[in-house]
Image (cartoon, rainbow, N blue to C red):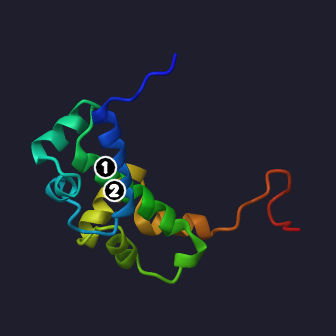
């Protein structure tokens, strides 16, 4: 049986897409998202509460995930951690580093550097790279 998603579920999905498309905006506030979707801030919070999350925690999680991917991407190796943090809406580098470490268990620099180390092939002894 196929059930049609509720209007609130469809709206939440639209808001989630809006968040993903605007991660670089420092002011990705609940008020801005609500205005962009023609709803009240209270209703926005209600929609997220029904899913067991908050709007702000979702935005923070998506920003951290995007920054973590960028920190490990080869094309961002020459960028500073602060510039990557800014690219995903984090205006305070210290706050970004604090959140990142609490989420991923390492600093942004350690995270980035771990991606740059050559990976050892599991079937080859150390020291023999062929």
The residue at which mark 2 appears reads as 18
Along the line of sight, which residue is nearer the eye, 127 or 64?
64
Q: Residue at x 32, y 29 (%)?
A: 6
Looking at the picture, does residue 42 appear above or below residue 2? below
Q: Tell me the number on the disc at residue 40.
A: none
Viewed as shown, does residue 6 lie left or right of 68?
left
How far from the left and from the top, in percent, is residue 15? 31, 49
Query: Please, what secondary structure does the residue beneath circle 1 have?
Result: helix
Q: How many residues crowd mark 2 within 10 Å: few (<14), some (14–19), many (20+)?
A: some
Q: In the rendered image, which quarter contains the C terminus?
A: bottom right
10 Å crowding of disc 1: few (<14), some (14-19), many (20+): many
- Quadrant position of residue 77: bottom right
The Cα–Cα distance between marks 2 and 1, rounded to whole angstroms, is: 5 Å
Residue 58 in percent (x, y) is at: 31, 47
Q: Are marks 2 and 1 in contact (CB under 8 Å)?
A: yes
Number of the label disc, if any, that sits on residue 15: 1
């Amino acid at each position: 049986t196929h059930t049609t998603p509720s209007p609130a579920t469809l709206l939440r999905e639209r808001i989630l897409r809006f968040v993903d498309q605007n991660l670089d905006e420092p002011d990705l506030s609940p008020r801005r998202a609500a205005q962009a979707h023609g709803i009240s801030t209270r209703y926005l919070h209600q929609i997220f509460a029904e899913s067991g999350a908050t709007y702000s925690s979702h935005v923070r999680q998506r920003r951290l995930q995007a920054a973590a991917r960028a920190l490990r991407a080869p094309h961002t190796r020459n960028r500073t951690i602060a510039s990557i943090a800014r690219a995903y809406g984090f205006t305070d580098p210290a706050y970004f580093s604090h959140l990142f470490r609490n989420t991923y268990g390492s600093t942004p620099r350690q995270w980035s550097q771990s991606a740059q180390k050559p990976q050892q092939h599991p079937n080859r002894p150390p020291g023999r790279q062929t």
